[in-house]
Image: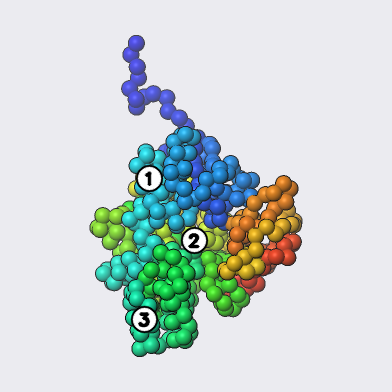
């Protein structure tokens, strides 16, 4: 019997040239991962979707498995046993720990950078040194491991000054010190008191940049960067940009401050030189490259790199994404992003983060949340879970940032009004949120 050659045998149906029926795992448990699961579950390429470990909201989208995002051995073992074909890694910690390297070494496709490339977020010193070497615009900086030397530098140069823990600190390792005393306290917190553990073994002291912040995301395939829609995050815990920094209290997209001219400058002066430098240095970047920018009077400057989708930026970006997300993630993995063009809904998306009281410090866990059905019924609203669990019929808060109430509108003002209408229907006395997400855009006329 003569068999057909492989090229002529019956093939599985495909979409965008990718085989339908993939088994996919999303790693993580936050609002970003809920948004990723929400988008990937809608793809015709996805046959079976898992999330490890997930949360109560993600469980409504897909099957959650009780494996911690940092348990690399258990994740690889699960993928082997379940014949997972593609893994999308959400949070930064497993990327910096080398999860993608382990998965790829086991023959499992994974979306995200290698451990070496993830140093762009894992070490702020590494990122700043790369910027200095390749003339990428950023704030002036100095690196210190000795607390007394760092404080001596502050006393000479004065305040305001930015103090940053070098490593991963869940968005809480940055202090914009308004006085010498505050800067010295932040230095002691890192280097003497070891508040951030190994992440704070080195501190960076940076000049304070003035302007307006913006989040700029790209998909990157090692050589080519495909810009996504722009967004603006709100880091401070209190209205009016007051209080300590958090992982993010809200976001909206698009960010009106990012004109086409500014976007070209960001690509030409920041993103493209970084991608080229990483490739030349033998650690090509694949995944999501998220540049935190300050738009100054002299142009865009890089505040920091993240090597994954922002949270809550991911929620607003995916609410606006008209195209299928999954083929784009696969294209980034396969090195063929140049063939892709993503389409976006013209509406504005705005996310209000509801957090447990005490956040970003010690927050109380276990409080009951009610009213989500009513809140989610508001026109144009989707509620992404960031830190929730089910206990019988009850929905409980399980973390600092707990919900991301996300709304679409014709402009920022309309999206904002819808999001807060839904927030006000959530019955959760132990929760709080900022009431001014999108305030800059509204002040400019609603954009």
- Which SS class for mark 1? helix
Read off the residue under disc 3. 148
**Where residue 21 sits: x, y (%)?**
50, 35
Observer able to see residue 111: yes
The residue depicted at 54 percent of the width and 41 percent of the height is 49
User: Where, quadrant-wise, is the N terminus in this rendering?
Assistant: top left
How far apart in space, not on screen, are marks 1 and 3 (Cα)? 40 Å
Q: Residue at x 64, y 51 (%)?
A: 389
Residue beneath disc 2: 310
Mark 1 and mark 3 lie on one chain; the one further toward the N terminus is 1
What quarter of the picture does the C terminus occupy?
A: bottom right
The answer to whether 9 appears left or right of 352 in the picture is: left
Image height check: is 425 above or below 137? above
Q: To which residue does mark 1 refer?
A: 102
Question: Counting other residues with Cα less than 10 Å from the Cα at mark 1, is it few (<14), some (14-19), or many (20 or more)?
Answer: some
Vertical placement of 152 versus 57: above or below?
Answer: below
Q: Horizontal and vertical percent for residue 31? A: 57, 56
Q: Which mark is residue 355?
A: none
Earlier along the polypeptide chain: callout 2 or callout 1?
Answer: 1
Judge depth for marks 2 and 3 and give the one in front: 3
Name which residue lies at 38% across and 68% down: 201
Q: Helix, strand, or loop for circle 3?
A: helix
**Crowd around label 2: few <14 · some 14–19 · many ≥20 (10 Å):** many
Q: Which residue is at the far front?
A: 193
Q: Which residue is drawn at 36% across and 62% down?
A: 120
């Amino acid at each position: 019997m003569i068999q057909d050659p492989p090229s002529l045998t019956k093939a599985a149906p495909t979409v965008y040239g990718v085989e339908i029926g993939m088994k996919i795992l999303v790693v993580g448990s936050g609002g970003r991962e809920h948004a990723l699961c929400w988008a990937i579950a809608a793809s015709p390429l996805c046959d079976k979707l898992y999330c490890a470990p997930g949360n109560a909201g993600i469980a409504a989208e897909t099957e959650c498995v009780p494996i911690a995002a940092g348990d690399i051995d258990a994740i690889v073992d699960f993928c082997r046993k379940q014949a997972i074909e593609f893994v999308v890694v959400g949070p930064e910690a497993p990327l910096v720990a080398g999860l993608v390297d382990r998965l790829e070494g086991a023959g499992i496709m994974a979306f995200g950078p290698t451990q070496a490339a993830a140093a762009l977020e894992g070490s702020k010193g590494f990122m700043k040194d790369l910027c200095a070497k390749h003339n990428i615009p950023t704030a002036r900086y100095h690196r210190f491991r000795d607390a007394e030397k760092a404080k001596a530098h502050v006393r000479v140069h004065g305040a305001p000054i930015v103090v940053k823990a070098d490593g991963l600190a869940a968005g809480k390792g940055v202090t914009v010190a308004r006085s010498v005393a505050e800067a010295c306290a932040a230095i002691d917190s890192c280097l003497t008191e070891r508040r951030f553990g190994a992440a704070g073994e080195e501190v960076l002291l940076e000049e304070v940049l003035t302007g307006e912040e913006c989040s700029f995301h790209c998909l990157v395939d090692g050589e080519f960067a495909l810009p996504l829609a722009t967004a603006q995050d709100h880091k401070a815990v209190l209205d009016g940009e007051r209080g300590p920094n958090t992982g993010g209290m809200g976001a909206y997209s698009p960010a009106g401050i990012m004109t086409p001219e500014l976007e070209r400058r960001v690509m030409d002066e920041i993103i493209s030189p970084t991608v080229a430098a990483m490739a030349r240095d033998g650690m090509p970047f694949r995944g999501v490259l998220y540049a935190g920018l300050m738009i100054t009077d002299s142009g865009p400057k890089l505040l920091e790199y993240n090597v994954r989708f922002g949270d809550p930026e991911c929620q607003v970006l995916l609410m606006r994404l008209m195209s299928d997300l999954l083929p784009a993630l696969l294209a980034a993995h396969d090195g063929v992003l140049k063939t892709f063009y993503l389409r976006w809904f013209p509406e504005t998306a705005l996310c209000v983060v509801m957090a447990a009281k005490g956040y970003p410090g010690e927050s109380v866990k276990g409080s009951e949340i009610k009213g989500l059905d009513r809140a989610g019924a508001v026109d144009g609203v989707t509620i992404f879970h960031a830190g929730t669990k089910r206990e019988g019929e009850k929905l409980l808060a399980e973390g600092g940032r707990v919900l991301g109430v996300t709304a679409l509108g014709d402009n920022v003002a309309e999206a904002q009004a819808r999001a807060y209408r839904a927030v006000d229907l959530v019955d959760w006395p132990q929760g709080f949120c900022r009431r001014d997400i999108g305030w800059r855009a509204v002040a400019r006329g609603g954009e």
